[in-house]
Amino acid sequence: MLDLNPVYLFYILIGLSAAMFAEGMYLAFYNAGSYRKNINRRLKVVDANADRESVLVQLRRERGLTAAGDYRFNFFDLNRLLLQSGLSIGLNRLLLFIVIGAIAVFAGVAVFEGNVGHAALAAVFATLVLPILVLKFMRARRQKMFGAQFADGLDIIVRSLRAGHPVPVAISMVAREMADPIGSEFGIVGDEITYGADLETAMRNLYFRVGTDDLPLFVTAVAIQTSTGGNLGEILENLSGVIRLRFKMRRKVRALAAEGRASAMILSSLPILMFFVIQFMVPDFYASVWHQPMTKIGLAAAGFWMGIGNIIMFKMVNFRI
């Protein structure tokens, strides 16, 4: 049985109590003014720099673009992934973090395992594969957040148009009133229109920066209204209703597929969890076979087969609407 010392349990409870007290103090003294200042990244930059053209250039460079809004290097897919992930630390800092991470992984594997070849493979993985996976995760999360905000942003534009404001002013209201990611993205759209871009081009640039499935409907509606005329407020109001229904349908499908996702996570994590439990309770259980070559081959084959199963289960419970 697991023998837990009561003194350690007491220390753990003290740590949890201190963390909860710190969180309570933070929430108690957190005021609406700081929220207003930090509502989105663009407002932070505007607060520090009154020149809106410099703000636009800075936001573009933070996202891996040139000052003119073009891709910085010729790898189109990588440029698009970096742009749509919303990473704002800049390309140079990102490369620096990747190099530091690769060196740390190489040193850690070399020290703990003592195999330079395995350390080199781990460093290559940390340099080439891991950043791509992290950026894809960030892009998916950002697109999900943008999709949840998009209908509310359209409602703000519709109300502003009905009040008699032009389209650029309505877009700027979204940039002032809403949090990231939609706040900064629509702020960039407003700045691009201010400095010479036409409305359709600015909207298409918005789609390239975000890449969600609902944006082409918005871009097409604005393009058609710009070229042929019509009641843009009514069009966007209907579009907002369609987007809300699609979002509702996605949530319904996700709820229906929750059982499959839970089964996939349990089946995937159970072997790994049991391995650590056995290793913790009986440290010598795997000692006689741990350094055998067939053990590593068997673990690699089991991991590969588990990965195939995870991909199949992921495809079964995740599909686009």
Image (tube, rainbow, N blue to C red):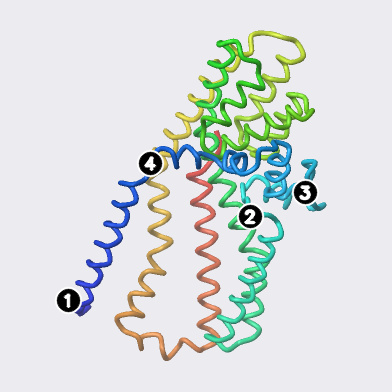
**Residue that badge 4 annotates:** 31
Q: CA distance from mark 2 to mark 4?
A: 27 Å
Q: Quadrant of residue 5?
A: bottom left
Q: Residues within 10 Å of mark 3 (few under 14, many from 20)?
A: few
Q: Secondary structure at mark 4?
A: loop
The C terminus - image quarter:
top right
The location of residue 300, given as percent across then percent down, is 55, 74
Name the N-terminal-most of marks 3 and 4: 4
Q: Contact (CB < 8 A) between labels 1 and 3?
A: no
Q: Position of residue 169 (x, y in %)?
A: 63, 21
Mark sitting earlier along the chain (1/3): 1
Question: Of circles 3 and 4, which is in front?
Answer: 4
For label 3, the residue is: 76
| Separation (CA) of disc 3 from disc 4 | 43 Å
- The mark closer to the camera, 2 or 4, is 4
The residue at 77%/24% (across/down) is 198
* Figure quadrant of the N terminus: bottom left
Mark 3 vs mark 2: give the one in front: 2
Contact flag, marks 1 and 2 (Cβ < 8 Å): no
Q: Is residue 227 left or right of residue 263?
A: right
Question: Closer to the N terminus: mark 4 or mark 1?
Answer: 1
Q: For the residue marked with disc 3, what is the amino acid? A: Phe
Which of the two residues, 208 or 90, is positioned nearer the viewer here?
90
Q: Secondary structure at mark 1?
A: helix
Please tell me whether residue 295 is drawn above or below residue 67 in the rendered image: below
Kindly identify the residue that appears in the image at 56 percent across and 39 percent down: 181
Q: Residue flagged by tag 4: what amino acid is it?
A: Asn
- Total labels: the figure holds 4
Determine whether the residue tagged by mark 3 lies in a helix, strand or loop: helix
Of the residues under marks 2 and 4, which one precedes in the sequence?
Answer: 4
Q: Which mark is residue 6?
A: 1
Looking at the picture, does residue 32 appear above or below residue 21? above
